[in-house]
Amino acid sequence: MKSSFFRSFFASPWFKRIRDRLFGARGDRDPAADKAGPRAFAWVRRAERKVAAEGGDLTETAKTGLWGEEIAARMLVEKGYSILGRRVLVGRRDELDIVALRGRDLVFVEVKTRSGEAFGRPSSAVDRRKRHALCRAAATFLRRSRYPDLFYRFDIVEVVGRRGASSPPVVRHLEDAFRFPVQWHFPVRRKRGRAEAKTPRTQ
């Protein structure tokens, strides 16, 4: 009696609508996200919308940055990545440009947009201080996501061009551009009676 009740309850249309509103439609999610836990990334879109809602009049630099992030996101989707969030605020001062998922890789993407390369490649701006800030932001993201059972890595996407220009921008995807330093440790997760350490990619 109880089993038939629960089957009908979870199969009901209104339950599916509530589930999809909270966690996204099943067809829109990467299977790895479901394996990591349906609630793991439920907070990300809320953090993304909060950043967008702060709004106001944007400077030309901010508009160029958003343009570059849009191009980077489209490129990642074409390469088979699922975009979990963009401009994700994870603290008072920490933000992640793009968080993406492909297979077992959870990827934190830093997008650098420049009009030209007279002063060096855009990725050169991701110096030691910036990498430390990104590691700190990613660690906060992982904590809020309850340390999903995935591989973690950092990518950089370079976008070189101008908004509204007749020629398309140059886009470069630098996979595994840098890694968590070895001193970063994440909690151990117990699974099927044995402890399994988290697996960030370190250097």
Image: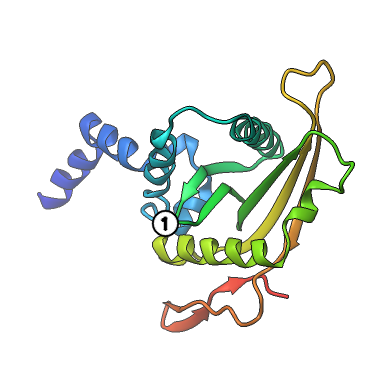
Name the foreground residue: 164 vs 47: 164
Q: Of all residues shown, which one is farthest toward the right?
A: 118
Lateral position of residue 115 relative to residue 140, left or right: right
Q: Residue at x 76, y 26 (%)?
A: 162
Q: Of all residues shown, which one is farthest toward the top?
A: 166
* Residue 156 on image: x %, y %: 72, 51
In this rendering, the answer to whether 111 lies above or below 202 is above
Residue 49 picture quarter: top left
- The residue that disc 1 covers is 92
On the question of residue 55 being in view, the answer is: yes
Name the foreground residue: 196 vs 138: 138
Q: Residue at x 48, y 47 (%)?
A: 88
* Residue 150 on image: x %, y %: 56, 63
Lateral position of residue 166 relative to residue 155, left or right: right
Residue 37 picture quarter: bottom left
Name the foreground residue: 23 vs 61: 61
- Mark 1: secondary structure: loop
Lateral position of residue 115 relative to residue 97, left or right: right
In this rendering, the answer to whether 150 lies above or below 183 is above
Q: Amino acid at mark 1?
A: Arg
Q: For the C terminus, which image quadrant?
A: bottom right
In this rendering, the answer to whether 56 lies above or below 156 is above
* Residue 24 on image: x %, y %: 39, 38
